[in-house]
Amino acid sequence: MNDASRATLARLLTTHSVRTGHFRLASGQTSSVYVDVKATSLTGEGGWLIGQALFEAALALEPAPAAIGGLTLGADPLVTATSIAAHQAGHCLHAIIVRKAPKAHGTERYLEHPPTLAAGSSVVAVDDVVTSGTSTLQAIEALRAAGFKVEHALTVVDRQAGGRQALADIGVTLHALFTIDELTGH
């Protein structure tokens, strides 16, 4: 991602996604800063920039991933935008949506992905925000249980609150587009 695009994405995240006040996070922690990446990823410009940035980050990883997947709902627009960015660049990077619980009807699947994606494929886990890493860990557990190889995770924002270490503890390296400090100026 070039400097101008990175600056634009940072501005969009700061404008649309970063809020101050008193918040209880999904991790259970409390914070004076809340980051709702969906507020940016659901805009055309924000979604496009995030997709481009995550695709570029995934492309730089070894082994090269066949897919990018994450826990619904935060990862849904991210995996879609990234898969589209890859396609536009002439690459195939499938999207996987990890349900929080198996579907209660039809195929009763836990994961939604193209049927051509083979077990054993390298998959990058993705999350909009990583705090403690709990939702990213849940996605990785489901992806690994389905037979996928997960060694890397991507996030738009790393809150730097233990998630990186929690992922490292299970052999996954976290790569962040931004840290919370970069968006809040701390």
Image: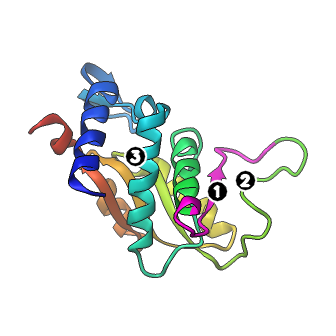
Q: Which residue is mark 1?
A: 96
Amino acid type, mark 3: Leu
Q: Mark 3 or mark 2: which is in front? A: 3
Q: Mark 3 or mark 1: which is in front? A: 3
Q: Residues within 10 Å of mark 2 (few under 14, many from 20)?
A: few
Q: Which residue is mark 2?
A: 112
Task: Determine contact: label 3, label 1, CB under 8 Å.
Answer: no
Amino acid type, mark 1: Ile
What whole-number distance in Å separates the C-alpha atoms at marks 3 and 2? 24 Å
Q: Is residue 41 visible?
A: no
Left or right: 72, with 129 as reference point? right
Please give the label number shown on residue 49. Answer: 3
**Nearest to N terminus: mark 3 or mark 1:** 3
Q: Is residue 99 above or below residue 146?
A: above
Q: Residues within 10 Å of mark 1 (few under 14, many from 20)?
A: many
Q: Quadrant of the C terminus?
A: top left
Query: Magenta span has 142?
Result: no
Q: Position of residue 70 (x, y in %)?
A: 55, 53
Query: Magenta span has 95?
Result: yes
Nearest to the observer: residue 72 or residue 1: 1
